[in-house]
Image (cartoon, rainbow, N blue to C red):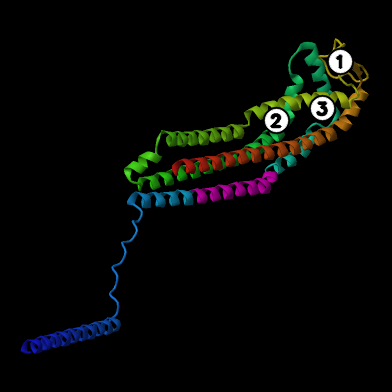
Amino acid sequence: MKTIQTLFFVALFAVLFASTRTSCSIERSSREAVRAAAEPPAAKAPAAPPAGPSADEIAWARYRAAVDAAGKAHLARLDAMYGDFLRGLHEKGPSRFAAVRDSVPAVKRSVSGFKTAGKMVKDIALDKAKGGDRFERRIESLLEIPFVRPLSRARESVFADCETFSLKLAAESRAYREEIGRAQAGLPEKLRLRVNDAGFQALVDRDKAMMRKLGRKAVENAACVAFEAAFAKSTYAAARELVLILGGKAVAKGGLTVALPFVDGPIPVGDILAVGGAAWTAWDVHKLARVLPDAIENQLRATVDQTQRDTLAEAARFAREAHDACVASVVELGRAAAK
């Protein structure tokens, strides 16, 4: 009986102990849950930032930006210089030829009169009979100083502006190359060697050669030596034709003929002088003297107008070609420098 009672109490104690333990465990879990809800969540460790660009990448980006900005600035300046040149050409160009036009009346007076016309006819006859250039020298004496030289100087002044323009282009091109060089100097060595290679240096040398060529062309145009010689030759030949045509004695197909033995003497009045395959009388010379001055004046004014047009057109063409060549060089250098 005692044994049964003992076992009963042991079992009861075990049940009570287990119940008490479970209750304490539930109460502790509840307290922990309440405390966890009341406490703010723990901060998470920040994620590692992404890797930034390398020092070489930063240097290259800055270099590219500098080259692009320099190229745009230089292209804008080239366009502005070209526009200024064209405006100056059209505003000042015609005035360069005004003095030549002003000289035409004096030349007209110098070829007026029976005596001058007769000498011209006689010179043509003598040149055919004995050879020589008497007529050309007479026309030269009348036109060279008051007309031909001023016309050449007018052309020279226009092409002197072309030479100045080419020098400005050369300075701008040199400044752009130097700006690229300064930008390259800020690159790390391996990047600098990559862009400043043999190909890039070949472009730089070609740009320098192009600028020298433009300068030489402008100087050659300004010299006008070929123009003056060709102009004088064509002018004297035209004057010879003019004298014959105005006298109604167009040059025969076989050329000039001289039939009088007294051709070395004074112009025969009332006699006949055979020039241009036709007979000339004093009356013919008189008629020539009346129409020759106006014809010479018209011819010289037309010559000034044509020379002015040709000169200004040639200068504008030179400037356009020079500008376009420089623009192409800037673009090519910039592309090669930032490859």
Closest to the observer, 174 or 116: 174
**Part of the protein shown in magenta:** 71-95
| Image disc number at residue 116 | 3
First along the sequence among labels 3 and 1: 3
Q: Is residue 148 magenta?
A: no
| Residue 174 horizontal/vertical position (percent) | 46, 42
Q: Amino acid at mark 2?
A: Glu
| Image disc number at residue 144 | 2
Closest to the observer, 188 or 124: 188
Asked if residue 213 is positioned above or below residue 279 in the image, the reply reads below
Q: What whole-number distance in Å separates the C-alpha atoms at marks 1 and 2?
A: 30 Å
Q: Amino acid at mark 1?
A: Lys
Question: Within 10 angstroms of label 2, few (less than 14), some, or many (20 or more) residues?
Answer: some
| Residue 305 horizontal/vertical position (percent) | 75, 39
Q: Amino acid at mark 3?
A: Thr
Is residue 157 something that shows in the picture? no
Is residue 303 something that shows in the picture? yes
Q: Disc count in the image?
A: 3
| Residue 27 horizontal/vertical position (percent) | 23, 86
As drawn, is 86 to the left or to the right of 249?
left
Asked if residue 81 is positioned above or below residue 216 in the image, the reply reads below
Which quadrant would the C terminus be assigned to in this image?
A: top left
Circle 1 residue:
253
Q: Which residue is drawn at the image coordinates 70% and 42% (left, top)?
A: 99
